[in-house]
Image (cartoon, grey):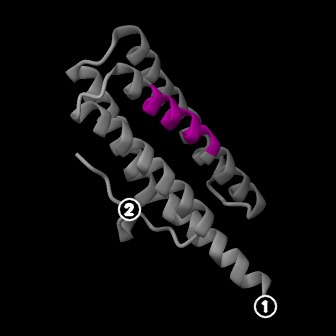
Amino acid sequence: MYYEFTDDLKTGNSIIDSEHRTLIKAANDALQAVKQGRGMLELESNVAFLASYTKTHFGNEGSLQDKYEYPDRRWHKLWHESYIRDIELTYNRLQKEGTSPVLVSELVRRINILITHIKEQDTKVAKHIQHCIDNQDN
């Protein structure tokens, strides 16, 4: 499986889109490490980066939501916190248990959840931000 940064993932906000590209690359790197059998150390490193960068991105996105008073920012923050816990749980299990089909499946599921979140929620955030920016000029 390989994820592409397709039009349905573009939010129109350059900061958010750039960070989403980085997240998708990190997800692909982790999955490629599994597919190509590059070893546990590389897989762990890739998943560690994915977990860490997810925190960075969610923090940046949260700051934008606060700045532009996104109406659903409280819910969005709770979702981010839950997702961070989940991806860290996957990483911790990987460290303790090693790679397995079940754990790879869990990683793919968590990545799919993130992709769906981008498509369904982050596009709303970006539209709200753009609306605020457009109205500041008036």
Q: Is residue 81 above or below residue 112?
A: above
Residues at circles 2 and 1 in contact by the CB criterion of under 8 Å: no
Residue drawn at the location 29% of the way across and 28% of the way down: 38
What is the x, y in percent for residue 69?
73, 61
Q: Residue furthest front?
A: 38
- Asked whether residue 44 appears in the rendered view, the answer is yes
51 is within the stretch colored magenta: yes
Task: Name the residue nearer the viewer: 114 or 19.
Answer: 19
In the image, taking residue 116 as reference, residue 78 lies left or right, namely right
20 is within the stretch colored magenta: no
Query: Mainly helix, strand or loop, the magenta region?
Result: helix
Q: Earlier in the sequence, mark 2 or mark 1?
A: 2
The residue that disc 2 covers is 5
- Asked whether residue 109 appears in the rendered view, the answer is no
Residue drawn at the location 33% of the way across and 44% of the way down: 112
Task: Name the residue nearer the viewer: 36 or 112.
Answer: 36
Specify the segment rendered in magenta.
45-56
Pick the quarter of the image with the C terminus.
bottom right
Give the residue type at disc 2. Answer: Phe
What is the x, y in percent for residue 100?
24, 18
Residue drawn at the location 53% of the way across and 65% of the way down: 124
Pick the quarter of the image with the N terminus.
top left
Instruction: Give the SS element for disc 1.
Output: loop
Q: Is residue 87 above or below residue 15?
A: above
What is the x, y in percent for residue 26?
44, 43
Give the residue type at disc 1. Answer: Asn
Q: Is residue 48 above or below residue 95?
A: below
Give how far apart the Cα atoms at labels 2 and 1 are. Answer: 33 Å
The residue that disc 1 covers is 138
Instruction: Give the SS element for disc 2.
Output: loop
